[in-house]
Amino acid sequence: MNKPLAERLRPYLLDDYIGQEHLIGINAPLRNLIKNNNIPSIIFWGPPGVGKTTLAKIIANETKRTFYSLSAINSGVKDVREIIDKAKKNIFFNSPNPILFIDEIHRFSKSQQDSLLGAVEQGIVTLIGATTENPSFEVISPLLSRCQVYILKAFNEESFDKIIDRAIKKDEYLKNKKIKIVEKDALYAFANGDGRKLLNVFDLIVSNINTDIVEINNKKVLDILQKNITVYDKNGDMHYDIISAFIKSIRGSDPNAAVYWLARMIDGGEDPKFIARRLVILAAEDIGLANPNALLMANNCFDAVNKIGFPESRIILSEAVIYLATSPKSNSAYMAIQNAQDEVKKTGNLSVPLHLRNAPTKLMKDINYGKDYKHSYKNNFVDIEFLPKGIKNKNFYKSGNNIKELEIKKVLLSKWNDKYNF
């Protein structure tokens, strides 16, 4: 049993695929495309272990297409061109385009992605890319515009139940044991929505219980995994756990822990842009107006990391991480937009007040569009209502309890009196 359980159980037929019902359920969009053998170029976007690679292989199998595969980590322009040349030579009359699958396509540089454009546009290959990163940021626009983006979701408990049941019934090793799952909370918590991790954890637990009758409970799972924790630190399997610890350490104002988790990611070969991008998000979400310079620092860090690359960019990342960890924290901007979006969902499309409407024509002016609104007032302020009538005086922004925002609150109170007195 040299192959990992996840590889032993990889499905090759669509009907054996578990999860992603929104894509491959009955009458779902991707199932219909496969059924009609009408496959566009595709980007699969989702967290690790949700079946992106498996689904690409199933598409090739179900539509009887040649399947070429590259990993963006260790492939370059030369490898791409070699496969495109192979595809050209193997094109026959009325034969469907071969599929070129690129795992972690977000790691391809612009020049590497450019090398795909012609072949995709001409139909020499049908591209299927897999990424854990938002393709809007990581895939060049000309290539992205030629692809259909499908979002894959982390597995839920129901899908996990089906995956484990299939493993027990189908795997040649496991089906010879009498496996009883008494408790599954710890097992599923370690997997954290990742089907590959679930199967590898399950395989490890069963192999550590040297009897034909295997009873799995939370205590056994925790005991075995604590002894073998390094298994889940290989090849990015703890990717999302570590980034979570990293973000929470910065949010918790602990630069010591934040730099440790940064070192773990660097040592594990994490993409520096991935780290820097999350610092930009954190600067806005968790520090915000308590220190507006944090966003500038994080954005400058992202730009510098793009220019410099490893190993030197580790110093830039360290500086930014320590700065953000030691900055005062406020999520008021994050909460303000959340509150406003919640209100929009509840109240729908409220009318724009007449005095705020644009009045480019005489008719619009005659019916009071823009009436009483002036571009300039005394002291650059006037007390008028800028919200729709139905939510007049509604508060979305509430200042945080920090020096910078208390100054902001003071200015707001001097202008609006009780409106911002909270």
Image (cartoon, rainbow, N blue to C red):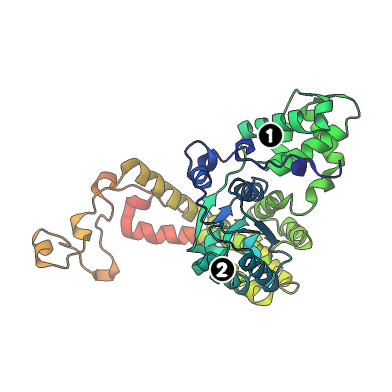
Tell me the SS state at disc 2: helix
For the point 52% across and 53% down, the residue is 39
Residue 22 on image: x %, y %: 51, 40
Q: Are marks 1 and 2 in contact (CB under 8 Å)?
A: no
Residue 281 can be seen, yes or no: yes
For the point 28% across and 52% down, the residue is 387
Residue 143 on image: x %, y %: 52, 66
How packed is label 2: few (under 14 Cα within 10 Å), some, or many (20 or more)?
A: some
Tell me the SS state at disc 1: helix
Q: Which quadrant: the N terminus? A: top right
How packed is label 1: few (under 14 Cα within 10 Å), some, or many (20 or more)?
A: many
- Number of numbered discs visible in the structure rendering: 2
Residue 7 on image: x %, y %: 76, 44
Residue 394 on image: x %, y %: 33, 47
Mark toward the start of the polypeptide (1 vs 2): 2
For the point 75% across and 31% down, the residue is 170
Judged from this view, the residue extending furthest toward the front is 93
Q: Amino acid at mark 1?
A: Ile
Residue 403 can be seen, yes or no: no
* Of 276 and 95, the residue lying toward us: 95
| Distance (Cα) linking label 1 and label 2 | 37 Å
Residue receiving disc 2: 119
Judged from this view, the residue extending furthest toward the right is 210
Residue receiving disc 1: 163
For the point 61% across and 69% down, the residue is 302
* Residue 154, image quadrant: top right
Q: Which mark is residue 103?
A: none
* Of 107 and 122, the residue lying toward us: 122
Q: Amino acid at mark 2?
A: Ala
Question: With 265 as the anchor, is 206 left or right in this view?
Answer: right
Question: With 12 as the anchor, is 125 left or right in this view?
Answer: left
Q: Is residue 276 above or below residue 164?
A: below
